[in-house]
Image: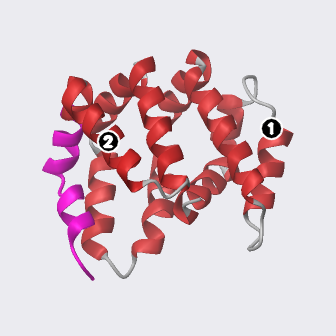
Amino acid sequence: MNRNLVKALQVAWGLPEFRAGVRHLVDLEEVAGLLATLSLPDHDHEVERSLLNLLRSALDTVEIREAVLLLLEQDEVRKPLVAAAVEPLADRPGQAAAIASAAEDPAVRRELRAVLANATVRELIWQAIENQMSDNRFGLIRRAAVLLVWHPGVRRLAWALRRHGVFRELRRKN
């Protein structure tokens, strides 16, 4: 699992505002236990699967998805998460700046909300994640192509990210 994702989840979980915002929707102890186990260097891949299943369930539940997206609109929640996400990118300042810029753009957040509201798109995203975890590059590329070709909201989100230089910086070699 991507260490940056784990770090961002741990930072989110460490924010009292975030925990308070989702307290009534998720089992706080289960999430805390999974995150603690993931922070160990030699954790089991089943723990990663459990966390991904929990994330998938959360995104598929309208109340949890909306609560998290509303929390991300708050500066005191979003800014520490963005800082944690770009911290490991210190050796790639352009990429860090592009990601931070995109995260602070309300238009990008609006497009992300619209994309995540579509159940078909969420399913394709999870299939792409599963393809990546199983090192199935062809499946990953295929899912990404389907998302971009058949779902206009994904294209709008991609263009919004492109305006901030996210894709250019991802392609750039160190």
Tell me the SS state at disc 2. Answer: helix
Residue 76, above or below 73: below
**Residue 162's x, y, as percent?**
17, 49
- Give the residue type that dot 1 points to: Leu
Q: Nearer the viewer, residue 141 or 108?
A: 141
Q: Nearer the viewer, residue 18 or 52?
A: 52
Say which residue appears at 47% left-offset and 73% top-offset.
Answer: 88
Q: Earlier in the sequence, mark 2 or mark 1?
A: 1
The stretch in magenta equals 156-174
Callout 1: few (<14), some (14-19), or many (20+) C-alpha neighbours within 10 Å? some
Indicate the quadrant containing the N terminus: top left, top right, bottom left or bottom right.
bottom right
Residue 135, above or below 151: below
**Residue 73's x, y, as percent?**
43, 34
Asked which colour scheme the image uses, the reply is: secondary structure
- Give the residue type that dot 2 points to: Arg
Say which residue appears at 22% left-offset and 67% top-offset.
Answer: 171
Residue labelled with disc 1: 28
**Residue 154's x, y, as percent?**
26, 32
Residue 98, above or below 94: above
Callout 2: few (<14), some (14-19), or many (20+) C-alpha neighbours within 10 Å? some
Picture quadrant where residue 55 is located? top right
Tell me the SS state at disc 1. Answer: helix
Q: Which mark is residue 118?
A: none
Q: Which mark is residue 142?
A: 2
Residue 171 is at least partly visible in this image: yes
Examine the structure image and report whether residue 165 is included in the region drawn in magenta. yes
